[in-house]
Image: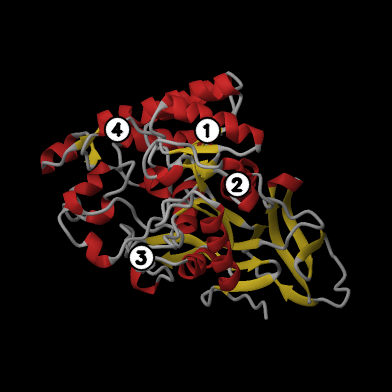
Amino acid sequence: MKRLLKGGRVVSPADGIDGTCDVLIDGERIARVGRDLPADGAVVVEVPAGLVVCPGFIDMHVHLREPGQEHKETVATGTAAAVAGGFTAVACMPNTSPVNDDANVTAYILAKAAAANLARVYPIGAVSRGSKGELLADIAELKQAGCVAITDDGHPVATALLLRRALEYARMFDMPVIEHCEDPSLKGDGVAHEGYYAAQLGLRGIPGAAEALGAERGVLLAEATGSAFHVAHMSARASLRAVRKGKDAGIRVTCEVAPHHFTLTDESLATPIAYDTNTKMNPPLREAADRDAMVAGIADGTVDAIATDHAPHHYDEKKVEFDRAPFGIVGLETAVPLSLDRLVHTGVIRLPRLVELLSVNPARILRVPGGSLAGGAAADITIIAPDLRVRIEASRMRSRSKNTPFDGWELRGGVAATLVGGRPLFVNPDVPLRLD
């Protein structure tokens, strides 16, 4: 069917659009964007004042847990959470069981995504077989099967030599290598940022230098190989310096920051509830100077993308002693409100920059379709309500797991609707928008 989104503010930086426009959708594709478009037989949808039509948001760092950990999340529940959170596509990490290190696992994930028929799913393959850091996975096979990048996320590529080889092979297939930057010898058995609050609570610390050393290693090897290197879930100010230096030198390095790293600090370890395992993630929540550096990097353009590192865990797994709990929190359904509230409404960035961070740049880094509302592009659209009052309620999340430190937070800004291939897959009942 045809659908004409009429009279909303359209923000699409890749197309040079920021203003009141109409968007004509013909079936699964964008037909035209312009002012005062004729209905031409389309169903006319009047976009209420204050809503913003954007190219679909892409989360380039998600753990869907399937196969093997379906008690935490499945492809179906994860993509349901994605569309509710405003994401039309997600890229899923390979640390499943079995690890996504061959074409069969990739095909399984893609089949599950097709059956769910919600957000688009772009699998990311493992760098090494079993992510054990010993032998390279068959990168050509992973690429052919549908993987868009490679990573051993969850832990760093084991050796500099293996990372170099991965970068060299990935370059042949125009794929980025995404790195969980970490020096294992410095991280040790740490569970929280090495600082005042970890010391106060008796928790073993992880210094920011552990992450920064991994970032420096990757930037150097990206320079040596000419390959694309991407720093995942950056949290430390020294890592930001390494990325900025690499960019200034013309090295193909990009980076992402998760909402929890630009909103929270390690003070959350102690307040309002001490030892809350929903404040345990890797990399950890760091001190205020690191948090402020991430915000500055977002503002000055050093940071390329906002990605959630959506890491669902079952309630029973998190409801244990802090040392024993797994790292990670869910993020698909909180990222957009947090970004609008803490970045846009505070004046750190404007809406076009947010669209770059959530749509344009993830598509560019992963070499996947998206980030544009140009004629002929897939009609993947996120409509946001920047002034909507949102209360985060973990119990109402679509994700199978509810492990979030943001439960009960009240924020300004949220998702009005999500369309994938022209299909409205989520419409917020609190917004006066009708897409049927």
Q: Is 332 situated left or right of 51 in this image? A: left
Vertically, is 433 above or below 32?
Answer: below
List the residue tagged with mark 1. Answer: 166
Viewer-closest of 252 and 361:
252
Q: Local crowd at mark 4 within 10 Å, few (<14), some, or many (≥20)?
A: some
List the residue tagged with mark 2. Answer: 141
List the residue tagged with mark 3. Answer: 72
Query: Please, what secondary structure does the residue beneath circle 4 have?
Result: helix
Q: Is residue 73 visible?
A: yes
Amino acid identity at mark 2: Glu
- The N terminus: image quadrant: bottom right
List the residue tagged with mark 4. Answer: 184
The reply to whether the C-beta atoms of the residues labelled 3 and 4 are less than 8 Å apart is: no
- The C terminus: image quadrant: bottom right
Viewer-closest of 351 and 198:
198
Q: Mark 2 or mark 1: which is in front?
A: 2
User: Image point 46% across, 34% down: which residue?
Assistant: 296
Q: Position of residue 395 (x, y in %)?
A: 34, 73
Q: Is 193 situated left or right of 150 in this image? A: left
What is the spatial separation of the Cα atoms under label 3 and label 2, in whole angstroms?
Answer: 28 Å
Image quarter for residue 89? Answer: bottom right
Query: Which label sits on residue 235?
Result: none
Q: Local crowd at mark 3 within 10 Å, few (<14), some, or many (≥20)?
A: many
Amino acid identity at mark 1: Ala
Q: N-terminal of the two: label 3 or label 2?
A: 3
Query: Please, what secondary structure does the residue beneath circle 1 have?
Result: helix
Q: Position of residue 162 (x, y in %)?
A: 46, 29
What is the spatial separation of the Cα atoms under label 2 and label 1, in whole angstroms?
Answer: 14 Å
